[in-house]
Each structure stands twice: as structure tokens, then as C-alpha cells.
Amino acid sequence: MEKIDKQKLGDTGLHVSKMCFGSLTMGPLQSNLSPQAGGDLIIYGFDKGINFIDTAELYENYAHIREALKVIKREDYVIATKSYAYSKETAEESLKKAMKEMGTDVIDIFLLHEQENEHTLRGHEEALHYFIKMKEKGYIKAVGLSTHHIAAVKAALKMKEIEVLHPIVNINGLGIQDGNIEEMLDALKTAHQMGKGIYAMKPLGGGNLLKNFKASFDFVLKLPYLHSIAVGMQNINEIDINAAIFKGYEIDEELMSQVKIEDKRLNIAHWCEACGKCLEGCSHQALTIKNNQLQVDHSKCVLCGYCSKYCPQFCIKVV
């Protein structure tokens, strides 16, 4: 099989594969692979042509990437990470943590995590300025934001410093908090024309669109505004199937039979104490407590698993 195509990520000077390795699924928020197993998967994906990975401080999988970089030459790989840093001090901590735990002197893309609009960007302005300063010093190659909001994309259009956007894009607009997919694409079209690098997240709605995965992938792959698309993967079969799709090949039916194509769900264990701490980690308002029980609105949940990070009793898991 030919390797996945690469292209420029806007005006950043970075060249990335059309498919980005979404690493959330391999970490403790979901499948909880060991660093060695995760590193092996990253290397396998790299051999298929995937030279771009998306991670975040929250995902706690920097060690997995460190393992992969023992084999992959650093200059051949593009790493994007994210943090909730809001001040110079927290931004410095995030950058140092990322470089130390991944064993690298440079972070290709550093994003402000889950920005909502111009007001949240203003609240993270000190961290943004620190990352820009670190770019000038050569520790970061490009600065940007990740978002589930159209308003954040529009706010970034007014800021030259924001070079990379990582928004939700899928056929149903699942997870977009302040509008629909058509409105998101309108904003991304303008961002693309301005030279901003755009790599999308949640093409399968966090797993909710798995039953219609062919149509879902067709939709995002035909969009001219996306330089890359992050796809969560946690085993070799998923990498093989996704690589085939991105190259436009027919998918081997035997291979398909080995992968579960069914809707995933956020599972709440019976020992949940309904303490409410997980509500802090859900930006989609998919969790509520009623009659002293934690409840999930599956129509709002995008299965990111962020809420599980906040659970002191380890009650929450994507299954």
C-alpha cells in the first residue's frame, strides 16, 4: 500500500500526513495501553505514512510518544500537544513537561486546549504570549487552539498569532457547541484562505458515527479546508482500515470483521457516588446528577473521556 499523502499545514511550514494519529484513545482515558504498546502503534502508523500525532497534557500519554521517538527520527515527525495553561507560569510548566516527558527539545505545535470564544482567549492571553515567545526562541514551531466552538474559530481569524486550528468537524456536526456544521465550515473556509493550518477532530463523533463510518470519512475527506484529520486509533487493525480509507482503497472484508463497528457509550459503574466532580470535565453538558445518580445525555456526549480524569473512584469509562 502506498503511504498516506502529506501536505503543507497552512502557512506554518510544517508538512503533515492527511491522517493525524489521534492518541487520546490509547491513553488512560480510554484503552490505557502501556507506553511500549502505544509506542509500537505509533511506529506502525508511521510506517503507513502517518507522520503527525495529536496529544495533550490531559491525555497522559507523552511516555508513549517518547517510546516511538526511540525509533522514529524526531525531524521526521510532527507533534501537536495542548494544555489548559492560562498564565506564564502554567504555560512554562506545560511546555517543560511536554518536552521532558516526550524527550524532545522542540514541540511542533502547541495549542490552547478547548477555547470557546474571544473571552476565553483573553483569559489565556498570558499563556498565549508565553508560547509565542517560546516560538521566537525556537522551542515551538507553531501556536494555535483546539475548540468545539465556532466562536473560537472566528476569534482566531482576528489573531495572526493563532496559526493552527483544531476544531470539531463531522457530517452531523456532533459536538459543535454553538451552531451547525455548515456554520463551522464557513468559518474554516475563511481561516483556510488566511493561511491558517487546520486539522479536524472527531470525524466519527467520538465513535457515535461508527455505523456510518464510510459516509462520515467521505464527508471530511472531500472538504478542501482540512489539511489533516485526527482519527483516534488503538490497534493495528484500525490503523490498517483507516489508512486504506485515506488512500481511497477498498477495505478488506476479513479485516473489517475483526473490528467492532458499533456505537460506543460512556459507562458509569455501579459504585459511582455522584460526587459531581466529573461535571467539571464535561464542556458538552452531557452529565447531570438527578436523584443522587449520575446520568449521561448520550445525544450530547462525544465520548472524549475527559470526565473520567476527574472521577476519584474511577467509575467512568468509554466502552
Image: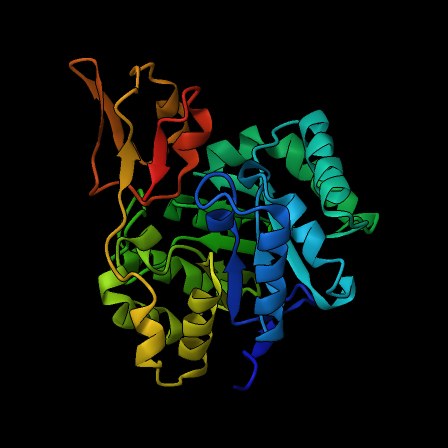
Q: Quadrant of residue 238?
A: bottom left
Residue 192 drawn above or below residue 104: below
Numbered circles on residues, count: 0
Residue at x 59% of width, y 44% of height: 61
- The x and y percentages for residue 152 are 45, 44
Residue at x 35% of width, y 31% of height: 316
User: Of 84 and 115, which appears nearest the observer?
Assistant: 84
Colouring rule applied to residues: rainbow
Q: Is residue 9 visible?
A: no
In the image, taking residue 271 as reference, residue 295 lies left or right, namely left
For the C terminus, the quadrant is: top left
- The x and y percentages for residue 242 are 42, 71
User: Of 23 and 141, which appears nearest the observer?
Assistant: 23
Residue at x 22% of width, y 63% of height: 211
User: Of 113 and 62, which appears nearest the observer?
Assistant: 62
Residue 65 drawn above or below residue 315: below
Q: Is residue 74 visible?
A: yes
Residue 312 drawn above or below residue 72: above
Q: Quadrant of residue 178?
A: top left
- The x and y percentages for residue 172 are 24, 58
Question: Which residue extends farthest left?
Answer: 291
- The x and y percentages for residue 146 are 50, 47
Residue at x 35% of width, y 56% of height: 184
